Image (cartoon, rainbow, N blue to C red):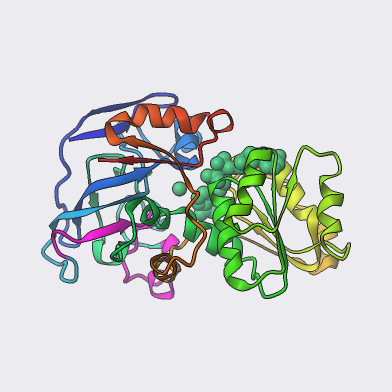
Amino acid sequence: MRALVYHGPGQKDWEEVPDPTILKPTDAIVKVETTTICGTDLHILKGDVPAVTEGRILGHEGVGTITEIGSAVTDLAVGDRVIISCISACGKCIYCKTGVYSHCQAEEGAPGIGWIFGHLIDGTQAEYVRVPFAETSLYRVPDGVPDELAVLISDILPTGHEIGVQYGAVKPGDVVAVVGAGPVGLAAITTAGLYGPSRVIAIDLDANRVEMARSFGASDGVVASDPDWKEQVLAMTDGLGVDVSIEAVGVPTTWDMALSLVRPAGHVANVGVHGKPVEFPLDKAWIDNLTITTGLVNTDSSPMLIKLLAQGRLDVGGFVSHRYKLAEILDAYDTFGRAAETKALKVVMTA
Ligand code: NAD
Ligand code: ZN
């Protein structure tokens, strides 16, 4: 088969590799029919994720059809259309039993981390992929849900929802600010709407993305390069700041921005993956009774999000900006890597 193989920082190729095979009774093989590229794949290609070694097939998002199952797989069958979750969960360890799949302790890749596709084992940017713990890591695609919407369940929708909205504890009437309106920030914006906020404010350097955020359910937008961006946000509250401030970028500036917007007793939910430490002004935060959260997505809310997707209850129509064939994946990477110019959001590739 062909796959997108990582060959060290800055190097990748779409090349011939051996077909994956069933290695454990709990595995399934999935023919990848739709996959996409995540900001995290770009981090890997920059060399920011040293755990990814040369020869690794990238990708942790995908939708496809099961072509083979291991002997222990009983409730999935060859021919089932499935969503591949970015988190692999054994379903049996102490973390899986409490829904914290991000810290699945199974000995697959490295124990203790649920994100293994395109990281510690071969991923989904390939014609076929081996899926460990198939029964607890694959979700059937409901009838009527197109692949290019189902693939949003692999990573970005649960990430924005769980680490942004649920950890941020958005509740009816809240004013929510989301710093960064990339795919993950937009996923937080669209799922925040499920909890009845009075306002959802999208903040981004890119005026185009701020504008686009409205079609995902943002009530307001602020361009981060405006000198008075902060005053604009505070003017949309009662002057005290937002109830929930979500960081969806992953750089020190946006962390500072998210902290600076929250009102006393509010929540700051960090979703961004930070490549270096940030300033954490605990000396000032304590007296504001802030709740500060962060984490790796668990995907425990995926079944609920799939139900809403099937009922058309999520504003997700605008996520896919570009479509390619799987064999054109190098062009897809190029488009995604120049998102500011190309206005790329999710770049989808199909078999
Ligand atoms: P992205 O790069 O596509 O989007 C980031 C957005 O932030 C862009 O629109 C950019 O214009 C904006 N931005 C950059 N600097 C800014 C600034 N100073 N002020 C305002 N906006 C600014 O990324 P994405 O795919 O949406 O992912 C967002 C973050 O979430 C990344 O760090 C990614 O690694 C992380 N992530 C976390 C998890 C998790 O489990 N916690 C899972 C997936 C992704
Ligand atoms: Zn991802």
| Residue farthest to the left, as pictured | 71
- Determine if the magenta segment contains residue 84: yes
Please tell me which residue is depicted at 61% across the width and 72% down the height of the picture: 195
Magenta-tinted stretch: 77-103
Please tell me which residue is depicted at 19% across the width and 32% down the height of the picture: 17
Q: What secondary structure do most residues of the magenta stretch adopt?
A: loop
Relative placement, left or right, of 288 versus 136 is right
- Determine if the magenta segment contains residue 283: no
Relative placement, left or right, of 249 versus 316 is right
Q: Is residue 4 above or below residue 78?
A: above
- Tell me where residue 68 sits by quadrant: bottom left
- Tell me where residue 1 sits by quadrant: top left
Q: Position of residue 7 (x, y in %)?
A: 35, 27
Q: Is residue 33 above or below residue 297?
A: above
Q: Position of residue 28 (x, y in %)?
A: 19, 56
Residue sitting nearer the eye, 101 or 346: 346
Please tell me which residue is depicted at 62% across the width and 42% down the height of the picture: 209
Residue sitting nearer the eye, 336 or 55: 336
Please tell me which residue is depicted at 30% across the width and 37% down the height of the picture: 57
Residue sitting nearer the eye, 203 or 45: 203
Ligand 1: give its quadrant. top right
Q: Position of residue 155 (x, y in %)?
A: 44, 54
